[in-house]
Image (tube, rainbow, N blue to C red):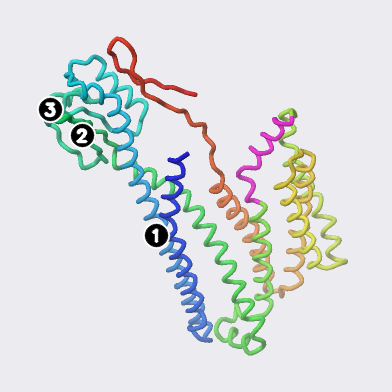
Amino acid sequence: MGSEMCIRDRVRDGFQPIMLAALLAAIAFGVATPVLGADMTIRKRWLHVMFATCFIGVSGLVVATLVTLYAEGAQAKSKSMADTLGQRLANIVAFGLNIWEIDGIDDLLQDYRALNPDMAHASIIVDDIVRFHTDRSAAGKAWTSNPDHYEYISDMSQPGGRNIKLAVAIPSDIVMRQSIRSIKNFAALFIASALMASVFLQIAGSMRRLGGGDRASREDDDADPTEGRSDVALLNLVKPVFFIAVATEHLSYAFLPQYITQLADKLGLASEYASAPFTIYYLLFALSLIPAGHLSQRVGAKPLMFAGLALSGLGLYLLATAPDFALICLARALSGIGQGILFIGVQSYILDVASPERKTRGAAIIVYGFQGGMITGMAIGSLLVWPGKPVQRRCMRSVRNGGLYADRCPR
C-alpha cells in the first residue's frame, strides 16, 4: 500500500504542472480572443492558430511528462531488482565466504532474470572482474558500463574485504516502448478533445452571430458569405447538443459488457442474459424512430430534443445506480428511446431551420455529431477503464543444501 501511495503521489506531482500550463493556456486564449477585434476574417484565422498552438503545446507537455515518468520508473525498477537480489547474497558476503565457490549463483541469476523479463542482464563483479553474469560468455571479463542500459550497481563490499558489486540493467528502449504505447492511447484522447473543442468553438461563433444582430450578420456576410447567415448559426447551436449526448452515451461502451456480464454471474443468471440490455437498447432505438418522426410533425423538434435528452440522462443515472439486472434493462430501454427521439428531433430541427441551400450542411452536422460523438465517447471511456489484470506476486527464497534458487510464490 505504501508503494502504491508513493507511485500515485509521484504521478500526481508529475502532472500538476500540466494542469497549471493548461489553465494558463486557456486563460491566455480567452484573453486574446476579444483583443483580435471585430474583423471576422482575422478573428477566425487567429483563433484557430492560437487554439492549435495551445493544444499542441499542452499535448507536448503530456508526452514529455510520460517519458520522464517512465524513465524514472525504469531506474527505480533496476534499483529495486538490485536491492532484492542483493539481500539474498548479503549474508554470503557478510560471513566472508568466497562467493564464486557457492553453488547455484548462476542458476539464481538466470531464474531471477526469467522472473523479470524487462531485465537486460544481472552480474556479480569482484574487483572489477565479472564473476557471474546472466550471459555466461561475459564471465571472467572486465566490467564495462553499457550506455544503452539503465544500470544500478549495488556495493556489497565489507570493510577490509574484496570489492564486490551487484549490477542490474534494464534496456533504455523500454522507456521508449512504454512511452509510445501510452502516446498511442493518448492520441485517441487528443483527437477526441480536438473534436469536442471544435464543436464548442463553432457554438461560440454562432452565439456571437446571433447576439450581434443584423450588423454582425452583415459583417459576416462580407467576410464569408457561406458562414454569415443566421441559419448557419442556428445549425451550429444544435451540433454540440447532439455531439455531447452521443459522446456521453458511448462513454460506457468500454466497460458496459464486462460490467453486465459480471452482474449476471453474480446474480446467478445464465450467460445468455448478458446480451439482453444491448438487444433492448438497439431494438427500442430502432422502434422509436418512426413514432418520433410522426410526433415531430405535431409538437415540433425542440420538445423531442428535450425529451430525448431527459430520457437519455435518466437511463444513464439508473445505469450508474441500479444494482438490479431488471433496472439495468430498464435503463438501457430508456437510453435507447431517448437516443432515438433525440436523433429524430435533431434531424427535424435541421430540416426546419436550414434553408434549401443548407440541407447538405445540415446532413453533415448529423453525421459529424453522431460519428464524432461516438469516437469521442469511446476514446475517452476506454482510457478511463483500468484493465484489472491479476497480479502474480513473486518472491526469492533460499533453500537447503547450500543452493540458491529463484522461485515463483503465488498467493
Which kind of residue does numbered mark 3 sit on? Arg
Q: Which residue extends farthest right?
A: 298
Q: Residue at x 56, y 81 (%)?
A: 224
| Circle 1 residue | 60
| Circle 2 residue | 155
Instruction: Tell which circle, 1 or 2, labels the residue nearer the N-terminal end.
Output: 1
Q: Residue at x 13, y 27 (%)?
A: 161
Magenta-drawn stretch, dominant element (helix, strand or loop): helix
Q: Secondary structure at mark 3?
A: loop
Q: Is 314 placed left or right of 97 in the picture? A: right
The boundaries of the magenta stretch are 250-267
Which kind of residue does numbered mark 2 sit on? Asp
Q: Residue at x 77, y 64 (%)?
A: 306
Q: Nearer the viewer, residue 80 or 256?
A: 80
Residue 162 shows which numbered tag? 3
Residue 175, percent across and down?
Answer: 34, 44
